[in-house]
Image (spheres, rainbow, N blue to C red):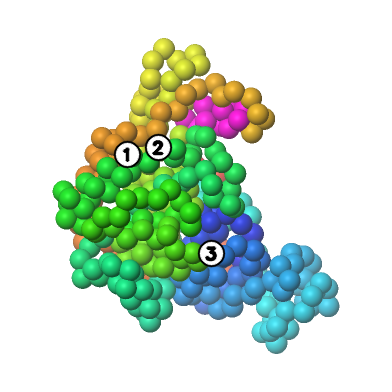
Amino acid sequence: MNLFAYLSAQTYGNFITQVAIASSVKENFNDSRLVLYFVNDRPYKIPILRYIRNADFIVQSPNNAVLPFECLSQFGPSRLPMPIPGWQENALWKTDLIFGGNMLNEGILVGDNALDHVHLTPEDEYLKEQMNLLKTLGLDTEKWFACVYWKENNYSFRPPNPIRDIDDNQPYIEGIDYIIEKLGGQVVRLGHFNSTKMKPRKGLIDLTLMTNSEEVQLAATYKAKFMVATGSGPASNANAFGIPILITDLPEAGDIWGDRSYCLLQSISGGDLDKEYKQTEIYDKGLAPQAYLDDHILWRSGKPMKYYYRKNSADEIIDGIKETYEFSQDPKNQVKITSIKNKRNSISFPLKRNPNLDNLIPFSKRL
């Protein structure tokens, strides 16, 4: 079975999700070959690709050119808009299944019919190099640590978003203090360079002070006991690696696809609401995700939003950290799933329809 995955995403979270899905799709077919094709237009793409172990070929687009699907056929090599090393010699054009775009959406990994998925994992020596770097930065690699991240409004690859961006980071600082002082852990802070500065303290390694830290941030997440993150790109690290995570300040639960995730929604008030509604109340009233979608359209149009979104308080975040920490204490919730071969839904081409294979067609199944 020749599988060809076109990793078309630019954004961080979507790209690592596509890589995780492509890896998992291969595991659901016996005797398969997986070719990944990507455009190297972001600094985090190659570091992320260091974490997929079952890809047979990873093809970087020459000159960041888009690949026409007409090239994926017997006569395809003659239609290539640019030379690609190994394309003809390895018959990379030979495909039985091509998938990309929304076929690599996290919806395939959620719900009752979710595709069984594996966790991404790096080579041992590569991971050791990155952990040694963390050690030189002050991390005690013999003791446990958590990763903490919140989205700010000055990230160069994404425009500001008043619903998702964190303007007041005090609740997260208090969460960091709780992890260090009450739980006895260490914290590695993730985020882009030039994020809001934090006061240095014992037990905190702040990777936002470094340039080009994509590799070490991925390694830190992979080795963390758990993660706390707002619903932005780095949260998908934990989902892809099988790390327990508390995803905070969500206006809706669209970023939840890992099987070890906790969701902490924002509160909503204003508009036609008679009071502030919190967490599960939002879903009970049918407000999420429609309220957020409506306001997102208004905001994009430069119009005032209908609702007010209250960010998570320090107490809410700390309560969520307690729950996530307890969850992470169970050893089975730390096990990396690297193979699903020989499971009942591991299949060979051609696909034969039967009830046991329903979880291979979950594209319309959403949270």
Mark 2–mark 3 distance (CA, rounded to whole Å): 27 Å
Q: Which residue is mark 3?
A: 44
Q: Which residue: 50% across, 66% down?
A: 212
Label 3 residue SS: loop
Q: Which residue: 41% across, 78% down?
A: 126
Q: Quadrant of residue 312?
A: top left
Q: Decide: is 113 above or below 307.
A: below
Q: Residues within 10 Å of mark 2 (few under 14, many from 20)?
A: few
Residue in front for this viewpoint, 226 or 132: 132
The magenta segment is: 288-299
Q: Which residue is mark 1?
A: 171
Q: Is residue 295 left or right of residue 309?
A: right
Q: Which residue: 60% across, 62% down?
A: 42
| Residue 133 on image: x %, y % | 36, 73
Mark 1–mark 2 distance (CA, rounded to whole Å): 7 Å
Q: Decide: is 77 above or below 202.
A: below
| Residue 33 on image: x %, y % | 57, 76
Mark 3–mark 1 distance (CA, rounded to whole Å): 28 Å
Residue in front for this viewpoint, 220 or 133: 133
Question: Is mark 1 in CB contact (under 8 Å) with mark 2?
Answer: yes
**Mark 2 or mark 3: which comes first in sequence?**
3
